[in-house]
Image: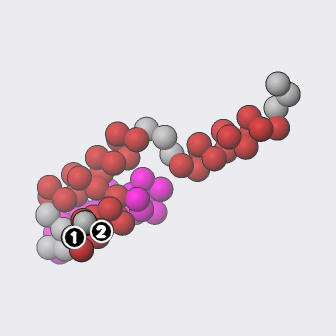
Amino acid sequence: MKTGAEYFLDYYKGRFAKGEITEEQLSQMVTAGTISEDEKQYIMKGKEQSGNDPDLVTYYEMTQGILPK
């Protein structure tokens, strides 16, 4: 079972992956003491590893569905 801190980090990881939060905003959170530098790196790592923007995946699937076979 995940801890509250893990849910917190995964929430921001998802927001970062969607572009809803920037690296600058994460840096401000580190400065404010909200998250650690290691947590910032963990949040940013998700976007680098996935490589697939969820919105682009959805767009690709939609366009493939309307193209002739």
Percent from the top left, x then y, of residue 27?
23, 62
| C-alpha span from label 1 to label 2 | 6 Å
Is residue 13 found inside the magenta-colored segment of the image?
no
Please, what secondary structure does the residue beneath circle 2 have?
A: helix
Is residue 16 found inside the magenta-colored segment of the image?
yes
Percent from the top left, x then y, of residue 59?
67, 44
Residue wearing tag 1: 3
Say which quadrant the C terminus sits in: top right
Q: Quadrant of residue 62?
A: top right
Residue 15 vertical position relative to residue 33 in the rendered view, above or below: above
Q: Which mark is residue 7?
A: 2
Label the magenta part by its dominant secondary structure.
helix
Residue type at numbered disc 1: Thr
Please, what secondary structure does the residue beneath circle 1 have?
A: loop
Instruction: Sort mark 1 into few (<14), some (14-19) or many (20+) by Cα contacts within 10 Å.
Output: few
Q: Quadrant of residue 31?
A: bottom left
Residue 50 vertical position relative to residue 16 in the rendered view, above or below: above
Residue at 59%, 43% in the rendered image: 57
| Span highlighted in magenta in the image | 14-32
Residue at 46%, 63% in the rendered image: 20
Left or right position of 40 against 62: left
Residue 26 vertical position relative to residue 32 in the rendered view, above or below: above
Residue at 49%, 40% in the rendered image: 52
